[in-house]
Amino acid sequence: MSLEISCKIAFVSLYQEATKFIPSEAWKQIEKYIPIPLLEAINEYQSLIKAINVEANRIVLGSEQLVEQPQSQLTSLFENINLTSDKYTNKKQYFYPIQPLTAESIFPTKEKTSDIEKQKKVLLQDFVQSLAKIPSSHKENLALWLDHFDTALQCFFSSLPSVYTAEISQYDHVKTTVAIATALVLADEQNKAKPFLLIQGDFFGIQDFIFSGGRETNKRAAKILRGRSFQVSLFTELAALKVLEACELPSTSQLMNAAGKFLIVAPNTEKIRQAIYRVQNELNQWFVDNTYGLVGLGLAVKEAAVSDFFGQTFKKLRDSLFKELEKIKLQRLDLTATTVSVQNIKYPFGECQYNSYFPAEDSDKQQSIISADQIKIGEYLAKKARIIICNKDAEIYQDRETTKLSLSIFSYHIIFTSIEEITGRFGKQAQAQQIKRLWDFELPQNTSSSLWNGYARRYINAYIPYFIVDREADIKKYKIVDKDNISYEKDKIKTFDYLACEDREKDDMGNYIGQAALMTLKGDVDNLGLIFQKGLKQPNFAKMAALSRQMNQFFSLWLPAYCVEHQQNMYTVFAGGDDFFLIGPWYSTQKLAFAMQQNFARYVANNPEIHFSSGMVMTKVGTPVHRLGEMAEEALEKAKKVDGKNAVTIYQTSVGWNKWETLSTLELKIEELAKKYNISTSYLYSLIHFAKQAQNKENNLENTMWRSRFYYRTVRYVVDKLKKEERETALKEITQLLGEQGIETHKMQFIIPLFNYFYKLRNN
């Protein structure tokens, strides 16, 4: 077996599946964009693959009977997920628009598309024309070209239903079928009873790696955090690539890669088993040598028979995959076996100022190689659009637009470069097989922007705030920024001290008011394991892959695009899989959190059983990076303890998301009432005590007196501060809004709108 042969087999399988929904006339137009060796392979392998594909379809659908039932529109997998009972529904009320992949088109709606066949023809024609964007020079590198083609399929066929079921997209059905078919063809004869090896990768130590600290970490916190997060995604992608290359498999054999985890379907051969063993040893040694065991990535290998993908047996297979992941976490870096774990490390220049685990490389900058790369990545993400993965002999000219990282990863060299119009297509290097992958990670300009640029896409970038235009420094607004560092240069990344001031606004006198502070937001989807293990009525391999891809897309695709459009001061540390971690101005972050919750509900077809919880922590600039992570995690854990989850914790108070909008409205009413009657902050501060008493009245008899004390305090305030003709109306309005609607109804949760009101007025 060779990589070229497996690419051919994968493409022929893909071709045969695609002919079910791409007419022959369109294929004739497509052929001119396809590498000649792959076209020749159609005749060479067609008869072999035809029977294999039938079997592969049965396997991915978990059904012995295959009946083509042309579907009109793709329905939502999320709509019928059920966690609380054994009674599953088969609703088909939500449909995906027949459009190319964008951050907005991933949302299902209750509106069916009119003139469906016309829309499908338009989409097909767009797909055909889009293939011209793939560099023709990349045709001589089959694995590279196939990776590009895979993204094109995703961008144009993930919104159309499979020919067998409306729940699974054409893309997910084809992708899983091709992966299974490739393994079936290439499995050893003696392993035909169990022809598959399911290879899972799991990155561990993510939190320790991202939030590890040094004496100067906070000075470049924004770039370092983003750089580390991107490195985690890069480690996982490159580990998956290392496995694929060792197994001589194309990218179509990789079905999942999100949140530090991936799944590859490989043929069960002794050669591949040995290759995986070698890769694991290489990964272990690299992580020990370069991160000193701070992080690692484990590989779990599971044999599978054809019968394992059907009925109740598939549920056992799926559960065993989860267990295998838990098992490899306990075998971290395999330190008792082949990994050389005792390192002769010296610190002649002291420790790295950004990560105290690592030795500094020189006396000037006092930073390690890996920290230096993290800072570079933090800068490149806002300026570059593509990333080249190549071998050490690649002849790629470097300049300000094309720059290599100092540290090679798993023997791959990593090069960041700009858009094609600036730095070209790197055709010569692709033809020489020097480039392994060329990934587009450019963020869409808005939620409706096309994602297809002619290159394989990886959703590993996230939004970073930067100055959009040059302008004069506003010293009064950014009062906490060091005067020597104030700069508004276009495309310069905003540091945390700038972000902390972004919610400060001018009052009626033209003076800036409002707290200068950051808010850290951390969250993840509730009951994710249960969703995969129990949520689907008739789970199968294709559904599992589709569900994983779609869950990841909300956070890795929609969230960055939404920030570009609506929240340009939000710093995404990481977002993908089922979790997210963001840092931004203290009040804007709250708005984003609620927007995420509302849009996530829309994304999952308003299924009340699918939701996420969040923790928010407000801090001043300069709080150590590791404490941001710890405090946000503590807040998230507190939110998870709310009955039913689906909650958020802020100001150490947890509240269900279903109450958030009510509390936000209450905040606006407090502002209006305070302005109308010139209510002092000292009076409003006293309400915090009453809210605490109302929350704990069962535990303390004295707390039951909060009403009378609140009323007495309010009467005194009205009599002392307001005109006689205002008092009766004011007393009624204040007691009703603050007492009944506020403290009585929400108790301790009432402090959330109160604190927001106070912080908006603070002048620091």
Image: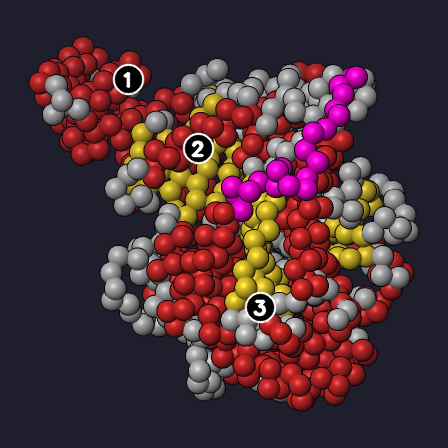
Q: Amino acid at mark 1?
A: Tyr
Name the residue at the top extreme.
720
Q: Residue under circle 2? A: 633
Q: Are marks 2 and 3 in contact (CB under 8 Å)?
A: no
Q: Is residue 18 above or below residue 312?
A: below
Residue 697 belongs to the span the image colors magenta = no
List the residue tagged with mark 3: 196
Find numbered disc 1 in the image and state the secondary structure of the residue it sits on.
helix
Disc 2: CA contacts within 10 A as few (<14), some (14-19) or many (>=20): many
Label 1 sits on residue: 685
| Residue at 47% in and 81% down | 164
Q: Amino acid at mark 2?
A: Glu
Q: Nearer the viewer, mark 3 or mark 1?
A: 3
Q: Which residues are magenta?
A: 328-349
**Res 466 visible:** no
Image position, residue 557 (x, y; %)? 56, 53
State the residue at coordinates (87%, 64%). 431
- State which mark lies toward you, 2 or 3: 3
Left or right: where does residue 711 sit relative to residue 606?
Answer: left
- Residue 337: image x %, image y %? 64, 41
From this view, report whether residue 707 is shown above or below residue 540. above
